[in-house]
Each structure stands twice: as structure tokens, then as C-alpha cells.
Image: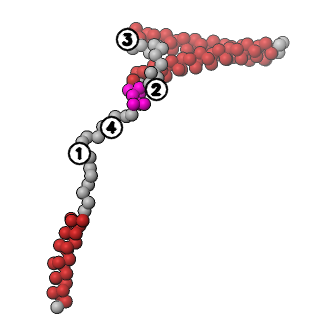
Amino acid sequence: MKTLNKLLSKAIGIPAIIASLLLAAQPAFAQLTNISLQPPNQFNSLNRVTVPSFIRFAIQGILVIAGLAFFFMLVWGGVEWILAGGDKAGAENARKRITSALIGLAIVFSAWAIIALIKVIFGVDLLSLDIPSVVNP
């Protein structure tokens, strides 16, 4: 009798569970059309930023920062020279600072000349002043 009850409970119970799962399931309201993965309009101008334009922007920024550093180092050396008065060590430090600033300027101009040479040889214009904008024009 116990085996018959077990057999009946399995024979009726398992199909009842399967039927209840199949019949009680809610339909999935999935989207049938393709989803567009385009960014919102506020990011459209990012399509104009490319690797060459980013490299161009970085080179221009580095050249500007180097030029400003030269200017401030030269002014600092001049002020240091003036404040040295008759002190030989102070004047020597100021002279070294001014010399270092001029050597740095020569390096920056050499880098600029190499970039201009790359433009002539390869036709890649890294010195154009097109600064990419992230804001919509």
C-alpha cells in the first residue's frame, strides 16, 4: 500500500508540478525590435575626436607648457640675478638657471622642427591649431 501511494503521488505529483509551472508562468514582454545603442545627442561631438587629433592636441599642449616653463624659468633666473647683488654664488645660480632655460628652449624648438620635418616627409600635420571640442558647436 505504501509503495502504491508513493507511486501514485509521483505519478500525479510530478506532472501536476510541471503543469502548474507551465500554466502559471507569465508571458515575457520582451522587445521584438532591435535596440539602438547610439549615444545621446550630447556625445555626438566625441565622434570627431580621433587618435591623430588627440595626439595633435597632446603635442600642442606639451609645446605650450614647455614654452611657459621656459618663460617662467627665464624670469626667475633674471630676478635671482638681480637679487644676487654682488654675491658670486647667487649670480652663478642665476646664470645656471638662465642657461638651463635656454637649453630647454632649444630642445623645444628642436622638437618643433622634428614635428615639422615629419609633416614634410609623411604629410601628417601635427602642428595645426585645431583644438577638438567636446561641446556641440
Picture quadrant of residue 101: top right
Which kind of residue does numbered mark 3 sit on?
Answer: Gly
Sequence-wise first label, 2 or 3: 3
Mark 4 in CB contact with mark 3 (< 8 angstroms): no
> For numbered disc 4, what is the local secondary structure?
loop
| Label of residue 32 in the image | 1
Query: Which marked residue is nearer to the observer: mark 1 or mark 3?
Result: 1
Sequence-wise first label, 1 or 3: 1
Where is residue 134 drawn, in percent x and y? 46, 26
The dominant secondary structure in magenta is helix
Sequence-wise first label, 4 or 3: 4
Which kind of residue does numbered mark 4 sit on?
Answer: Leu
Which kind of residue does numbered mark 1 sit on?
Answer: Leu
Q: Residue furthest bottom?
A: 1
> For numbered disc 1, what is the local secondary structure?
loop
Report which residue position mark 2 lands on: 134
Sequence-wise first label, 2 or 1: 1
Residue at 59% across, 13% down: 105
Please tell me whether residue 75 is drawn above or below residue 49 in the rendered image. above
Residue at 46% across, 25% down: 135
Q: CA distance from mark 4 to mark 1?
A: 15 Å
Q: Residues within 10 Å of mark 3 (few under 14, many from 20)?
A: few
Picture quadrant of residue 91: top right
Q: Residue furthest right?
A: 86
Query: Which marked residue is nearer to the observer: mark 2 or mark 1?
Result: 1
Report which residue position mark 4 lands on: 37
Nearer to me, 15 or 123:
15
Q: CA distance from mark 2 to mark 3?
A: 26 Å
> For numbered disc 2, what is the local secondary structure?
loop
Sequence-wise first label, 4 or 2: 4
Residue at 29% across, 40% down: 35
Report the span colored magenta. Answer: 41-47
